[in-house]
Image (spheres, rainbow, N blue to C red):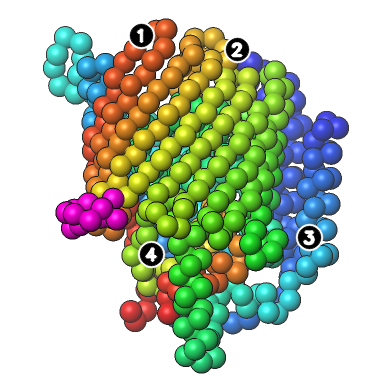
């Protein structure tokens, strides 16, 4: 932390520059597109929404159990036809019994995952400013919420290149032709040591292609650290949802100074099994194989980032049961292999996605 | 310093280029709201396309959610347009499918 503070204090002009950059990003699109918009019917006007997820999981790692309640509220505040203010926070408990026995105790982590202003400039560009999820790979931005992820344990390489960034971003998606969509995100993040809004000074981007016909998505991410070792990170992602099967295949690869590795995941919904249809169509089986190669970081840094400090292989198996819309029960078993000692990880619990309007939605 | 100036210049150049290539016009601003169908056949076709886009885009990450009221859905689709970099056309058709 000292070197971050030193770096921050050693360049006092950078805060002002970053602020100017943010303001520029906010103001520029408005100047570019200042014109009257078509009126929107009152019944179609977006209303503020409170959504998010809550969950309660029990994790057993090498025989030691841990209770993990969590809630991630998301606020969506649309303004006019082009603006959106959105924010997600995380409150996550980790409660364990003391070694000598006794009642569960522990800390509740609080994080601001994102607090951003989005401006839809045109069909190609959305300008985002504030604190946002770092667009590196697909897991961090799209698969992280517990009601979405197929397996509750995050991939071993998840901390590489991800997290949150404070700065500005341009992103968008558009059709190159009827068979190919292109999506991109490029950003600059400033150094911040503000409590709950910590971020590193980085720049990076992601470029992806989506083929809507076969439902194949592939892309690459890049990140340049503009402090410390000034190292580069890059990654690749791939996803495929075959139209003939209720199957979801996903994979990511990441390489950085802190480590490298990959994961492959397959999630299969048993809706095509010809027997016990009532229960099996709501059931999903999941498997994941993953490997991490430890990077050039100390044991302490690895622990801080949530990375194993030695080369690690892991196999994960999971079972999800969708009780109703937004509510699922999930269980998983993982076997981890590394030189620190092999271990079993069990997870069982429930995840719920909620969504409420914060205003009148009119007649249904 | 040079690196940051280069990044800033590149970003601004990109914004300007995109704007110059496709300045917002009336039909585009209208596309930010639910499109209207002129007859039943057109509405049915849009609904079919909307369902296809919905399954292709939303199904990439999560199971199909229930349909929410139109004003709520308009907010959620705008959020997902940013989060999942969904195209403008896909967003309009998904919104039509989810609300009409």
Q: CA distance from mark 2 to mark 4?
A: 48 Å
Q: Which mark is residue A341?
A: 1
Q: Residue at x 70, y 18 (%)?
A: A229
User: Mark 2 highlights which residue?
Assistant: A296
Label 4 lies in what chain? A
Which residue in the structure is indicated by mark 3?
Answer: B18
Crowding at dot 1, Cα within 10 Å, few <14 / some 14-19 / many 20+, comes out as: few
Mark 2 vs mark 1: which is more N-terminal? 2
Q: In this orientation, which residue lies closer to the viewer: A241 or A359?
A: A241
Residue B10 is labelled as none
On whether residue A273 falls in the magenta region, the answer is yes
Q: Secondary structure at mark 3?
A: helix
| Mark 4, secondary structure of its residue | loop
The image quadrant of residue A278 is bottom left
Q: Are marks 4 and 3 on the same chain?
A: no
Residues at marks 2 and 1 touching, judged by CB atoms closer than 8 Å: no
3D distance between C-alphas at marks 4 and 3: 35 Å
Per the image, label 1 sits on a secondary structure element best described as: loop
Of tags 4 and 3, the one toward the viewer is 3
Q: Secondary structure at mark 2?
A: loop
Do marks 1 and 3 both belong to one polypeptide chain?
no
Q: Is residue A159 visible?
A: no
Q: Are marks 2 and 4 in contact (CB under 8 Å)?
A: no
For the residue pair A69 and A25, the one nearer the viewer reads as A69
């Amino acid at each position: 932390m000292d070197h971050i503070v030193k770096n921050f204090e050693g360049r006092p002009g950078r805060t002002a520059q970053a602020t100017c950059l943010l303001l520029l990003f906010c103001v520029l699109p408005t100047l570019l597109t200042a014109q009257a918009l078509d009126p929107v019917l009152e019944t179609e006007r977006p209303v503020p929404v409170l959504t998010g997820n809550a969950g309660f999981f029990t994790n057993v790692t090498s025989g030691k159990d841990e209770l993990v309640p969590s809630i991630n509220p998301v606020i969506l505040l649309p303004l006019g036809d082009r603006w959106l203010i959105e924010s997600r926070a995380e409150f996550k408990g980790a409660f364990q019994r003391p070694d000598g026995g006794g009642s569960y105790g522990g800390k509740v982590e609080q994080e601001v995952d994102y607090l951003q202003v989005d401006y839809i400039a045109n069909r190609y560009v959305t300008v985002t400013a504030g604190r946002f999820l770092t667009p590196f790979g697909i897991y961090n931005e799209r698969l992280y919420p517990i009601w979405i992820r197929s397996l509750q344990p995050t991939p071993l390489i998840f901390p590489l290149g991800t997290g949150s960034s404070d700065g500005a971003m341009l992103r968008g998606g558009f059709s190159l032709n009827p068979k190919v969509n292109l999506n991109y995100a490029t950003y600059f993040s400033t150094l911040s040591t503000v409590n709950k809004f910590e971020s590193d000074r980085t720049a990076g981007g992601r470029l992806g292609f989506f083929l809507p016909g076969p439902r194949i998505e592939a892309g690459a991410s890049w990140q340049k650290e503009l402090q410390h070792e000034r190292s580069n990170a890059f990654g690749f992602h791939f996803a495929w949802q075959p139209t003939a099967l209720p199957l979801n295949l996903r994979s990511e690869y990441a390489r950085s100074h802190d480590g490298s590795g990959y994961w492959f995941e397959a999630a299969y919904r048993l809706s095509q099994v010809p027997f016990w249809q009532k229960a099996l169509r709501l059931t999903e089986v999941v498997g994941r194989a993953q490997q991490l190669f430890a990077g050039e970081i100390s044991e302490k840094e690895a622990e801080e980032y949530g990375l194993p400090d030695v080369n690690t292989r892991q196999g994960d198996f999971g079972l999800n049961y969708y009780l109703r819309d937004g509510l699922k029960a999930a269980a998983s078993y993982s076997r981890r292999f590394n030189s620190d000692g092999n271990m079993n990880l069990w997870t069982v619990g429930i995840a719920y996605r909620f969504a409420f309007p914060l205003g009148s939605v009119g007649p249904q | 310093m040079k690196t940051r100036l280069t990044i800033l210049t590149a970003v601004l150049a990109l914004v300007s280029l995109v704007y110059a290539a496709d300045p917002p016009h009336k039909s585009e601003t209208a596309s930010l709201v639910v499109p209207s169908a002129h007859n039943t056949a057109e509405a049915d076709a849009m609904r079919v396309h909307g369902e296809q886009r919905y399954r292709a885009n939303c199904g990439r990450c999560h199971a199909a959610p229930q349909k929410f009221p139109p004003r709520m859905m308009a907010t959620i689709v705008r959020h997902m347009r940013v989060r999942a970099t969904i195209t403008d056309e896909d967003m309009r058709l998904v919104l039509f499918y989810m609300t009409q």
